[in-house]
Image (cartoon, rainbow, N blue to C red):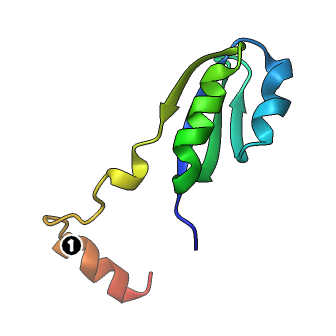
């Protein structure tokens, strides 16, 4: 599997979203706030981000920090009272 990372692209007009689709997997587009979330391969992210910044209709490009956030929680212990409720079969 190829590692992917999200890019948030802030734009000025909705009609230019079709040009953004060509460079990655379009996940979400907000008409009200005028941004799009696009997933791209992590190896190509520098070139694609540079290309998005060259477009005249793009206001700002941000990278998602989700792949770099640790998701292993040390103090995540289940509550003892809830643990017994699950075993009852309710």
Q: Is residue 90 above or below residue 32?
A: below
Foreground pick, 75 / 27: 27
Placement of 42 over or under 52, stated as above or below? below
Going 19% across and 66% down the picture, which residue do you hit? 76
Residue shown at 52% from the left, 54% from the top = 42
- Taking the image as drawn, is residue 10 in sight? no
**Viewer-side residue, 23 vs 75:** 23
Q: Residue furthest left?
A: 75
Q: Quadrant of residue 8?
A: top right
Give the quadrant of residue 59. top right
Question: Callout 1 environment at 10 Å: few (<14), some (14 to 19), or many (20+)?
Answer: few
| Residue at x 65%, y 21% (from the top left corner) | 54
**Residue 29 visible (yes or no):** yes
Q: Is residue 57 left or right of residue 66?
A: right
Q: Classify the position of the C terminus by image quarter.
A: bottom left
In depth, the one of 31 and 61 nearer the eye is: 61
Q: Is residue 40 left or right of residue 55?
A: left
Which quadrant, please, contains the N terminus?
Answer: bottom right
Image spot of residue 61 (x, y percent): 54, 26
Count of number-bearing discs? 1
The residue under the point 25% across, 66% down is 72
**Secondary structure of residue under mark 1:** helix
Q: Which residue is mark 1?
A: 81
Left or right, 14 with respect to 84, comes to right
The x and y percentages for residue 17 are 80, 28
Occupied quadrant, residue 52 = top right
Q: Position of residue 32 (x, y in %)?
A: 69, 17
Q: Where does the image place residue 69, in percent across and percent down from the top left? A: 31, 52
């Amino acid at each position: 599997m190829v590692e992917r990372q999200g890019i948030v692209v802030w734009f000025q007009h909705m009609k230019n979203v079709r040009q953004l689709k060509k460079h990655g997997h379009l996940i979400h587009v907000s008409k009200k706030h005028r941004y799009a979330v696009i997933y791209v391969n992590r190896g190509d992210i520098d070139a694609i981000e540079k290309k998005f910044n060259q477009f005249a209709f793009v206001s700002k490009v941000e990278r998602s920090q989700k792949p770099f956030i640790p998701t292993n929680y040390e103090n995540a212990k289940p509550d003892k009272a809830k643990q017994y409720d699950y075993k009852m079969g309710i």
